[in-house]
Amino acid sequence: MKDKKKGHNTKVSTSGGVLSPSKLLLSHLICGIGLASSFWLAINVYSINLIDNPAETLRLVWLIEVPVVILIYSLFRKDKNQSSYLKAVARGLLGLPIGAIINALGAIALGAPIGTHYFQRTLNWSLLMSAFTFVPAACVYGSSWVDWQHTFVHTKLIGIIDYMICLPAHGAVIGAWFGAWPMPLDWERTWQEWPICVTYGAILGYLVGMLGSICFAVFRVSHQHRKGD
Amino acid sequence: MASLTCTNFTLLTAAAILLQIAGLSLFVFGFFPIKPALSGVSGPESFHPSSCDSIEVQNFTALHPDQLKSLYQELSEIPPSYDRLILMVIDGLPAEFVIGRDDQPPSKIYKDAMPYTQSLLANKMALGYHAKAAPPTVTLPRLKAMTTGSIGGFLDVLFNFNTQALLEDNIIGQFFRIGWKMVMLGDETWLKLFPGLFTRHDGVSSFFVKDTVQVDNNVSRHLSYELYKNDWNLLILHYLGLDHVGHLGGRTSTLMGPKLKEMDEVIKLIHSSIIQNHKQTLLVVVSDHGMQENGNHGGSSYEETDSLALFIGPKHSHVSVSPTDVVTINQVDIAPTLSLLFGVPIPKNNAGYLITDLFHPLQDHELLRAMELNSLQLLKLLEAQTTHSTCKSLYLDAISLHKSWKMKNDLRSATNDEFTNTVFAYNEFLKTASQQLSHTATDKPMGLLAIGVTTMLLSCIIFLFLLFKLIQETYQNLKIQLSEAFIAIIIIILVLSMGSSSLVEEEQYLWHFMTSSFFLISLHKTFKSKSMNKIKTPILISIIIISGRVLRGWHQGGVNWTHLPDISKSLENSSSFYIKLLQILSVFVILILCFCTLSSLKSYVVISIMGSYFCVGLLVLNYVMKYQGDGDNDNDGILAAQMIYGLIVGLTSVMVVGSPWIISFYLKDLVLKIKDCLYLSGIAYVFGWCFLQLLLQKPVNSMPISLLLVQILATIFCGSDRGSDFKQWVEIGAIYYLGMAGHFSLGNTNTLATIDVAGAFIGISTHSTVLSGLIMFVITYASPMLSLLSMVMLISMKDINPNLKNMGQLLKTILGFPCLVPLGLNSVLLVAYTIILLLMRNHLFIWTVFSPKYIYVVVTTVCVLVGVLIVASTVTYIVSVVFLLRHRFYKHSTS
């Protein structure tokens, strides 16, 4: 599900994020561990799983993932000299519902079912998708429209931080898009229901995106080193 | 690279279109052989050779069933051997399980599972046959074959759409006409085939394949009652359980043994009841088809076609056939055998021939008479189907032998040899004729199909080549953007999805998903612009996306999830007030859109056109309020509908034909003139079509029509934006996809069941197949046709290079994409689906899923061809008239 990212201001940020591949690896690792531990908690502590209780499981996952993402990405905010860490955290929290609305609208436009029965599922799914896509960008870029446009519209990536945001977000969206494919097949499996396979696709795409961004970052740094020599 | 001239371009396109039509016709006639089936039913005339038509038997339908029965008996000269028939169908039972294969007795497991049946066979109380079934080996066509004796073509479905009832002459109908009381227990397919013929029935659904127990208990629970009841002449039992066992676990399933045992118990119960109570009963145990090792069926392998025919009656004791003798017959032979045994005429289209073993208890002259009757019927059918008849001489031989035998028999001087010779001669004819008749129905001429596919492929390549060439000529910058690539990706994904039967059934999800994805990508692209003041395009795209989502929710569609709630269902369940309200709303939405689009033309003529459309709108509204949903066709309603037809057709043709003459008066600039004329004609087509649809579509579909119009107009306006980076071919592709997605939003599916037959009779006073077929086409293809007709309007909104003074060059620039994009996209889909159909020809769902879809694909091709023809001829007409007028004007001014 391709989603549109939209800001309000056209201020150009002055300082690019300075980030080493090892830091990126570490932060991705923490995000990944957050995701894995939330699923572990769901299954072993609350004894719920995505297939039987999609809404509850998704709620648990985003409740754990969102703080992790916000706390980590706020460290790498682009306008460090203008806004404090706390301000970046607040931006992330503000970005969460906005991103959720955009993701939900995108999903509904592509055919996600509407109705009271599906409301909880769509709500929790879109909050999780927002944590994958919108929240990191909100923490890092804030209201800088140019940065948003660079990353999400033109996909012209400058710093490592751009890779760190762009690739997992696109991965999650494209993964979710492909995740919807098995839904019309007549296999009569529970996981074909909205939004279970879409979530699987999104998580898979997110992980692939994280992996890709690490590779890009390592490649870029080694390239620059060679250039420097 | 040298660019193609307009003439070459047109010639190549026309050649490709002709190739496509030729290839398609070759393929369709090769794949769906049209068998000239005889209509009507056999009556008393079937007992006479065709030469001597007696007048007295003309009006046999007026006879009382009992009179008819005795008339038949008198004419047939064969005393009926039985007076009751029990037809037990065991779905999917391979004959191998009961009578073995290739002189080998059945394997021990199966033999032990059916002890009673095996003992009947061993005691010569029963005659077992391998009844070879013709593909497709699925239940419905097999039941038709067993009851009509003919091997149906798929296209008969088209000729009796709307009803699943079997219209061809069949033995069940024949029994009904002689006043038989019939009882049916089991698969509800029988009830669909023969509605109203059964006195009592209990249909079970074959939908729950996982149920192997209840489905058969539901049949057997009535059995003891019916056997006790004794008031029927025909009892049909159709057990589905064995087929379900096969689908679950294949031939070697552990459930197979117990299931066979259960069937054996049923046979035992029936047979002992026959012996006790009613000796003149024939029990026929048949299976409709066999199954593969894994339990699937539908194709033409030995395992699937090896079905059973087992005749259990009290009269076989002196049959000469030894139980180990395995005899193979055809499934179609069951129909004539039963007809002759029970003294009814053989169904007209029967291609089978009687099983002589069953007639052995009869006297010699009666057996010969039975063979003669069968020969007469087959000969009549042969004469109707083929001109060349090598069989005719065989028939004459048999007849003359029969005649001489008869004469000698009267003088009691006939020898046994002469009798054997006559039987042999008849058999020879029957066998040859039957073979000839079956082969015309089942053989697929692979050569013909290959030529058809190749021709279509060639035309597809030409279309794509021309399209590519045109893109190359038009755009210097060949950098592919995501939204452009996506148009191609949609087609590739659709082609790939067609191989899966469930994606064919649920195609509507795919179209909607892909179209919405495309527009979301386009929306994403609009954020590329630096300035935020260009707000028009994102808003228009958002409108398209939202309308698309509403349209998707309108009809659930498909096959597997039709029961889920959707807007149309909730509207139909609520009061009709809301539907009427939506109808009024959509009339006004379309009227307002019409006025808005017209008002941009600065001419006084526009006001009168607006007035006319207002009248049309009011008339449609009046019709909708007053006559729609009445059911009965009263004269006022027909007249009102005809008036609207006339008005719409008249208005549209006046606007299209007259536009260059009206508009040229006040405009000097050539390009502007052409654009305005095209704009006016485009409006005429689009709105004329929409008002027609408001009249014809089901009431609940009026809103989707206006939403579709909104989508298409929004796309056109998006592309008309001067700064828009929507390339023209992308825009046309998008409109084509919108049309296809809309096709499903109007409630259409890939099954033939959703065709709105009721609407096809609006405004028609006399029954006319051509007219109602045309209206049915208009209703079903409302949305693709609308998208094609909107091309005229789209052309008028594009910038035309004013330097093109040559008419050919101008035509090529403005007509190239609007014609080639739909043709190219459709031809890709057509070729891909044709190849898939060919590959799937032995698939289980070939006749239920893939073939109906193919019919839709073929008609879509017709729709695209017609649409493109309309667009091309309109544009050519307008451009040439404008050029002509200018020429004349110059002449005037110079002279």
Image (cartoon, coloured by chain):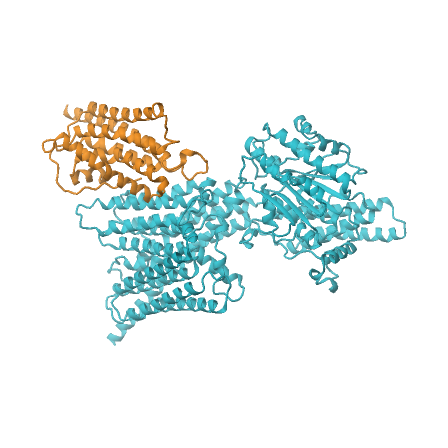
Chain colours: A orange, B cyan
In the rendered image, the residue lying farthest to the bottom is: B895
Image quarter where the C terminus of chain B lies is bottom left
The image position of residue B93, as x and y in percent, is 63, 36
User: Where does the image place residue A22, in percent across and percent down from the top left?
Assistant: 20, 22
In the picture as drawn, the residue positioned furthest to the left comes out as: A81
Can you see residue B24? yes
Q: Report the number of numbered marks.
A: 0
Q: Is residue B770 left or right of residue B234?
A: left
Q: What is the x, y in percent for residue A209?
A: 28, 30
* Apparent side of residue A73 relative to residue B757 in the rendered image (left or right): left
Q: Residue B251 appears at what percent x and percent y?
A: 60, 30
- Please determine whether, in this image, residue B689 is positioned above or below residue A55: below
Using the image as rendered, state which of residue A80 and residue B3 is in the foreground: A80
Query: With respect to residue B756, does B457 lie above or below?
Result: above
Q: Is residue B2 visible?
A: no
The reply, left or right, for residue B641 in relation to residue B677 is: right
Q: Residue at x 30, y 32 (%)?
A: A59
In front here: A174 or B281?
B281
Query: Does residue B393 lie above or below A181 as drawn?
Result: below
On screen, B664 above or below B407? below
Q: Quadrant of residue A199?
A: top left
> Position of B171 compared to B500: left or right?
right
